């Protein structure tokens, strides 16, 4: 891998750093759940948001507005793509048409799809 020549504070995470971040998020969920205190669902939600944003390449606005109806299944009922709508804010009394885009999943990110399924089926009802 080439060295990053730009501003070191703005470089993307490497594979090892990204794996360490995901491991930390999973450990945090387990630690909060074991403690018996409130916050396990919030920790799980936060971890899944970060993983989903990375796996699907979501923009901040798209992630904040993601809804269950945006998850589209493909064969065998698993999530295959996200139908995203960047709903613009009203500006100066004008309403702009929302921009839509579809983000497909790739086999390398099946772990993110499994995390979404777990969140929707097990955690979100609570």
Image (spheres, grey):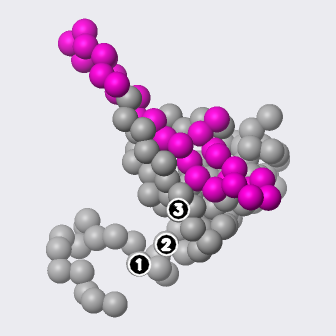
**Of marks 3 and 2, the one in the foreground:** 3
Report which residue position mark 1 lands on. 14
Coordinates of residue 52 in the picture (x, y in percent): 56, 55
Q: Does any portion of residue 5 appear in the rendered image?
A: yes
Q: Is residue 87 left or right of residue 10?
A: right
Q: Which residue has dot 3 on it? A: 55
Identify the element where label 3 is drawn: helix
Q: Nearer the viewer, residue 47 or 102?
A: 102
Q: Is residue 93 magenta?
A: yes
Q: Is residue 113 magenta?
A: no
- Report the side of 22 relative to 12 (left or right): right
Q: Please, is residue 85 above or below residue 8 in the view?
A: above
Q: Secondary structure at mark 1?
A: loop
Q: In the drawing, what numbered circle is on residue 18? A: 2
Q: Which mark is residue 76?
A: none
Residue at the far left in the pictured view? 6
Which residue is more in the foreground, 123 or 81? 81
Element carrying mark 2: helix
Q: Position of residue 84 (x, y in %)?
A: 49, 41
Judge whether 115 appears above or below 43 on screen. below
22 to the left or right of 87: right
Query: Residue 46 at x, y = what percent?
Result: 59, 48
Magenta stretch? 69-97
């Amino acid at each position: 891998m080439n060295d990053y020549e730009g501003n070191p504070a703005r470089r993307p995470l490497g594979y090892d750093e990204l794996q360490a971040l995901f491991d930390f998020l999973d450990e945090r969920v387990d630690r909060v759940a074991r403690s018996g205190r409130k916050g396990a669902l919030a920790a799980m939600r936060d971890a899944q948001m970060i993983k989903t944003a990375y796996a699907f390449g979501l923009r901040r606005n798209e992630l904040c507005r993601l809804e269950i109806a945006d998850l589209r299944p493909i064969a065998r009922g698993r999530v295959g793509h996200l139908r995203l709508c960047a709903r613009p804010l009203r500006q100066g009394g004008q309403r702009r048409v929302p921009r839509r885009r579809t983000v497909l999943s790739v086999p390398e990110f099946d772990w993110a799809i499994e995390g979404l399924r777990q969140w929707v089926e097990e955690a979100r009802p609570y």
